Image: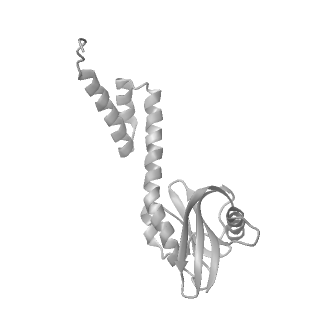
């Protein structure tokens, strides 16, 4: 049975992922992460950049390797390497696809994915929250450092912060400072 070696781009923009709907072939009108076959003497990264340029007329920046997927279709065996990417330049144009959508994590199940791409969707569901949480924690930590962890300044920061998760992080810091201020240290110890 024939084995196809392909690459796919998980293109991130803000908190959304680009999904494309296939405009040809056996899986027409099913959704996928764009990409394609690796040609002879081509690295996976070179193949991905070339394929995305051909399919969407954009240049991408590969940020990191995401996952390898192997999937047995009735007529061929697929080996697909997926990479997290961002758009370096250009605006996606539908050259080989008949539709494209930017999907949030909550919208990933709203489209009919090509079977092999379902594993990449599962990967995204697991990692998107983690990335967002880490970024929010870094942002809040930077803001609290700017306040010098001064209790009054932290309270002001808490009041002007709208994001619920970020407010909880700031509140936890405020409470820990208030608790520390109430602890009496015995100087004889």
Quadrant showing the N terminus:
bottom right
In-front residue for pair 161/124: 124
Residue at 59 percent across and 61 percent down: it is 83
Q: Position of residue 182 (x, y in %)?
A: 23, 22
Q: Residue furthest top?
A: 188
Q: Position of residue 119 (x, y in %)?
A: 48, 70
In-front residue for pair 133/18: 133
Q: How many marks?
A: 0
Q: Residue furthest front?
A: 189
Residue at 33 percent across and 41 percent down: it is 168
Q: Is residue 121 visible?
A: yes
Residue at 45 percent across and 29 percent down: it is 145
Q: Is residue 24 visible?
A: no
Residue 177 found in image quarter? top left
In-front residue for pair 9/189: 189
Residue at 48 percent across and 72 percent down: it is 118
In this picture, residue 116 sits left or right of residue 159:
right
| Vertical arrangement, residue 80 with respect to residue 178, above or below | below
Quadrant showing the C terminus:
top left
Q: Specify how the rendered protein is coloured.
A: one colour
Q: Position of residue 8 (x, y in %)?
A: 61, 68
Residue 20 found in image quarter? bottom right
């Amino acid at each position: 049975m024939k084995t196809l070696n392909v690459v796919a781009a998980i293109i991130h923009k803000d908190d959304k992922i680009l999904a494309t709907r296939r405009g040809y072939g056996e899986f027409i009108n099913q959704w996928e992460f764009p990409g394609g076959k690796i040609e002879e003497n081509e690295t996976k990264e070179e193949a991905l950049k070339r394929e995305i340029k051909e399919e969407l007329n954009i240049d991408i920046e590969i940020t990191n390797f995401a996952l390898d997927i192997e999937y047995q279709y009735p007529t061929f065996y697929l080996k697909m390497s997926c990479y997290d990417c961002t758009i370096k330049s250009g605006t996606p144009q539908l050259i080989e696809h008949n539709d494209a959508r930017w999907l949030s994590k909550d919208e990933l199940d709203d489209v009919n994915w090509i079977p092999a791409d379902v594993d990449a969707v599962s990967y995204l569901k697991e990692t998107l929250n983690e990335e967002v949480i880490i970024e929010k924690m870094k942002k809040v930590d930077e803001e609290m450092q700017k306040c010098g962890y001064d209790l009054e300044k932290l309270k002001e920061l808490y009041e002007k912060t709208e994001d619920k998760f970020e407010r909880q992080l700031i509140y936890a810091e405020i409470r820990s400072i208030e608790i520390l201020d109430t602890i009496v240290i015995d100087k004889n110890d």
